[in-house]
């Protein structure tokens, strides 16, 4: 009889014993889902530049100071703000308008019908003048 009593266990070590291991199955499930999400979204983040530059859904940039705008019209003329300038004089006019502030933001607007190379020549001349914040502008699409 004494052997039968010992085999049943005593008090706490019987039926309702607490579990001291960590259940890692939910952790592994969450980590696999995150891995898949990052594998799917990472190529989208590093894809190339959108080729259709004139239209975009991007929100307007917040502006601390009023940026200077360089516009290239459909006939190839270059305008600084509203004044027509030659490409050779553009950097000097930009320096005068920005009071030699090379960190001043400059927006380049190009008509859709002009060659992309002409826009890049204007941007290169601005960058070679020492200006560091040069950006292309595009229209927002109608929603």
Image (tube, rainbow, N blue to C red):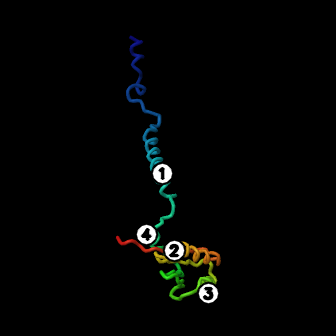
Image quadrant in which the C terminus is located? bottom left
Q: 125 and 100: which one is in front?
A: 125
Q: Position of residue 108 (x, y in %)?
A: 52, 77
Q: Which residue is mark 2?
A: 115
Q: Position of residue 43 (x, y in %)?
A: 49, 54
Give the alpha-carbon distance from disc 3 to disc 4, as whole Å: 32 Å
The residue carrying pointer 3 sits among few (fewer than 14), some (14 to 19) or many (20 or more) residues within 10 Å by Cα, namely: few
The residue carrying pointer 1 sits among few (fewer than 14), some (14 to 19) or many (20 or more) residues within 10 Å by Cα, namely: few
Q: Which residue is mark 3?
A: 96
Q: Which residue is mark 4?
A: 56
Describe the element under mark 3 as helix, strand or loop: helix
Select label 2 or label 3 by which is in front: 2
Q: Which mark is residue 38?
A: 1
Describe the element under mark 2 as helix, strand or loop: loop
Quick one: which residue is furthest to the top in this view? 1
Give the alpha-carbon distance from disc 1 to disc 2, as whole Å: 37 Å
Q: Position of residue 8 (x, y in %)?
A: 39, 19
| For the residues bearing labels 2 and 3, Cβ distance under 8 angstroms | no
Q: 82 and 10: which one is in front?
A: 82
Select label 4 or label 1 by which is in front: 4
């Amino acid at each position: 009889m004494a052997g039968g009593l010992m085999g049943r266990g005593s008090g706490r070590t019987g039926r309702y014993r607490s579990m001291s291991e960590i259940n890692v199955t939910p952790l592994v499930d969450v980590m696999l889902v995150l891995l898949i999400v990052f594998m799917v979204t990472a190529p989208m983040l590093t894809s190339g530049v959108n080729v259709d530059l004139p239209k975009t859904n991007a929100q307007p940039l917040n502006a601390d100071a009023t940026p200077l705008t360089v516009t290239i019209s459909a006939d190839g003329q270059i305008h600084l703000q509203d004044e027509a300038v030659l490409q050779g004089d553009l950097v000097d006019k930009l320096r005068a308008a920005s009071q030699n502030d090379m960190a001043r933001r400059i927006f380049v607007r190009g008509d859709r019908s002009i060659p992309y190379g002409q826009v890049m020549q204007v941007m290169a001349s601005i960058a070679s003048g020492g200006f560091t914040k040069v950006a292309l502008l595009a229209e927002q699409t109608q929603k």
